[in-house]
Amino acid sequence: MDRVTLGVIGGSGIYDLESVQDAQEVQISTPFGDPSDTLVVGVLAGLRVAFLPRHGRGHRLMPSEVNSRANIYALKSLGVEYVVAISACGSMREELAPRHIVVPDQVFDRTRGRPSTFFGNGIVAHVSFDEPYCSTLSSMVYQAVEKTGATVHKGGTFLVIEGPQFSTKAESRIYRQWGVDIIGMTALPEAKLAREGELCYACMAHVTDYDVWHETEEPVTVAMLIENLRSNAAVTKQALTYLAPMIAQQQERICKCASALKSAVITQRDYIPESLKKDLNLLIGKYDQ
């Protein structure tokens, strides 16, 4: 199979990309288990892409049940270098209204117990994560959404909670005091694993509600979330058709995402179990030459 350049991870309400041509389903097994679903591989605006519904078709997986390690590993195994994550989010600021889109540049972790690294069990790696989203890819995503005419905001902090319950009013008020901009349940550990996989990762976050802090708005419900996501579905798909040619024009990646593991593995190579070397060859093999 020809190398795939762009991976798209669809969030709530985005379970397919009809505009992908020559589409074929690809089932991939990884050392970390199976991805959320089969991947759809094809061509979008001249670029080979892979689409993966984060929660599985029919939305079968809770945020805590998503096997993000398998999802990222599967995309990496296809040759993917760029990943765009489509996510639903609540707004923590008045000016970020429902049906607006945010391309965040920071993330704040409030999840619990989700596997957030490919490493461990005999191999230790510490990647830089000060800038969790690729600035180059994020700029392209912002430009692509802007081309659709939708209201899009560049930058912001994405607070990630465990879920599956929405926030209490007390939590929502405190989160606002922290200065975060949007809130959701799935941006992590995806972003951390994408960095370990040396993938450029950006998020197209769709504002569906004002969480529960806004006194004049109804508290967030699934119905509200889905309605607003569906209204933005066409925007998402159009933005991706604008994004694909931008990525196709990129030369060799020079961002730090592309070499995140270069000096991250601290374990002496002769101490790493052979089974781990085999499982992680996709990630670290190029540094063991």
Image (spheres, rainbow, N blue to C red):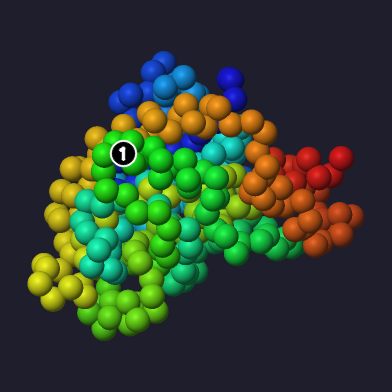
Residue type for callout 1 = Thr
Give the residue drawn at x 65%, y 38%: 253
The quadrant of the image that shows the C terminus is top right
Of residues 74 and 99, which is closer to you in this image?
Answer: 99
Give the residue drawn at x 52%, y 47%: 201
**Where residue 36 sits: x, y (%)?**
42, 44
Of residues 93 and 204, which is closer to you in this image?
Answer: 93
Dot 1: few (<14), some (14–19), or many (≥20) neighbours within 10 Å? many
Q: Is residue 31 left or right of residue 84?
A: right
Q: Residue beneath label 1, please?
A: 236
- Which residue of the protein is positioned furthest toward the right in this rendering? 270
User: Residue 118: which quarter of the image?
Assistant: bottom right
Residue 153, visible in the rendered structure: yes
Is 108 placed above or below 224 here?
below
Q: Is residue 89 left or right of residue 253?
A: left
**Where residue 125 sits: x, y (%)?**
72, 60
Q: Is residue 167 left or right of residue 224?
A: right
Give the residue drawn at x 26%, y 39%: 149
Q: Secondary structure at mark 1?
A: helix
